[in-house]
Image: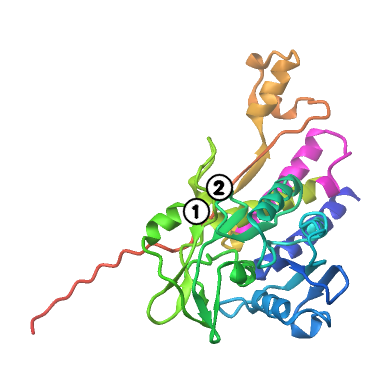
Amino acid sequence: MGAPRITFTFQRAAEAVTARLKNGVVGLILRDDGVAAGTYTASDETDLPSGLSAENRAYVLQALRGSRGRRPAKVLLSVMAAGAEADIVADGAAAFAAAEVDYIAGPPDMTAEEAAAVKSWLTRARNGYFVGKLVAADYAADDMAVVNFSASGIVAGGATYTGAAYCARIAGILASADLSSSATFAPLEEVAAVDAVEDMDAAIDAGKLILVHDGVKAKLSRAVNSMTTVPAGQSAGLKKIKVVEAVDLIRSYAMRLIEDSFVGRGNSYANKMLLVSTLQAFLASLEAADVLSSGSASAGIDLEAQRAWLKDHGADVASMSDDEIAKADTGSETFFALRGTILDAMEDFCVGLTMGGTL
């Protein structure tokens, strides 16, 4: 019954991946005394809890709006008391820990200290399955899981908004973006004007997600997160929101497949290869969805890691072939390597025009 169970688990994971490719989930932390503190789910305006303040209702509807004809699947609300006694992590962000949330935005009046507290919680949560990322205003976190939205003078519907008051809108756009595409230049049709950024390239290089108005419409700039310092051995591509989304997707679902179907099994070569084939099929589905570059993905036993483990445990690895290394007994340890090239989006264009003939 082992293989059918693995197939069923993979199919469930693939279905979840397909759903995420279509649209994601926003988590909003709200301060409001008009409704009971707790969690709520909203897919449209009719789902909003009665008693929610007009300001908070508008904030949630911003998140649900999306862009390019796409909307988030839903918005999860974590409502906490408006008083100073409420803790933004314990009473707000922590409610999302067991939920599949892609982007989190705090209340419009979230302080810098609160943003830092949510970021610290997020770092811990992302050590597991959690793939949530924070959208915060003018918060230079230097972190791939934090989007530093930097904008001011946002004019929409006759009112002027700060960047902080528009974080829910940005979270909704990012959560609704197709994972095979980038949110770069995603339009915000309702925005009539926004304060111009003097040096857009410098702002983007500083890890800021900004708004620009091209004279016809307002739109996001290049879709980058707040990372400016790339850790040693990692790719500068992690500065891009799209790339981090793909990494999170692979990490989360690979972990689920392993823990749901393989932890506790006998550590035989046959079981290892069953896991390899399952992971390979998972990666192939991402190639088909244009998340990974065609032909780039592979899964296999990590021979170098396995060789090092065997050597540390007294094996004469110098005399062993790769096949012998792969089939060797490694106790309770397993070593696998996933490889693939995340498909970037078309963002930089060079178009040449050649004209012939005479006037």
Residue that label 1 marks: 207
The tag earlier along the polypeptide, 1 or 2, is: 2
Residue 290, compared with residue 68, is above or below; it is above
Name the kind of residue labelled 2 in the image: Asp
Residue 73, compared with residue 343, is above or below; it is below
Residue that label 2 marks: 142
Residue drawn at the location 54% of the way across and 40% of the way down: 234
**Where is residue 212 drawn, in percent x and y?**
43, 71
Name the kind of residue labelled 1 in the image: Gly
**Where is residue 7 drawn, in percent x and y?**
81, 55
Residue 167 in view here: yes
**Where is residue 137 drawn, in percent x and y?**
58, 61
Q: Is residue 126 rendered magenta in the image?
A: no
Magenta stretch: dominant secondary structure: helix
User: Which quadrant does the C terminus fall into?
Assistant: bottom left
Q: Which residues make up the magenta segment?
A: 259-286
Please state which of residues 194 and 328 is positioned toward the viewer in this rendering.
Answer: 194
Please state which of residues 251 and 65 is positioned toward the viewer in this rendering.
Answer: 65
Secondary element type, mark 1: loop
Please state which of residues 262 and 105 is positioned toward the viewer in this rendering.
Answer: 105
Secondary element type, mark 2: loop
| Number of other residues with Cα within 10 Å of mark 2, as a class: few under 14, some 14 to 19, many 20 or more | some
Image quadrant in which you'd find residue 138:
bottom right
Residue 285 in view here: no
| Number of other residues with Cα within 10 Å of mark 1, as a class: few under 14, some 14 to 19, many 20 or more | many
Image quadrant in which you'd find residue 300:
top right
Residue 60, compared with residue 310, is above or below; it is below
User: Do callouts 1 and 2 mark residues in contact (Cβ within 8 Å)?
Assistant: yes
Q: Is residue 277 rendered magenta in the image?
A: yes
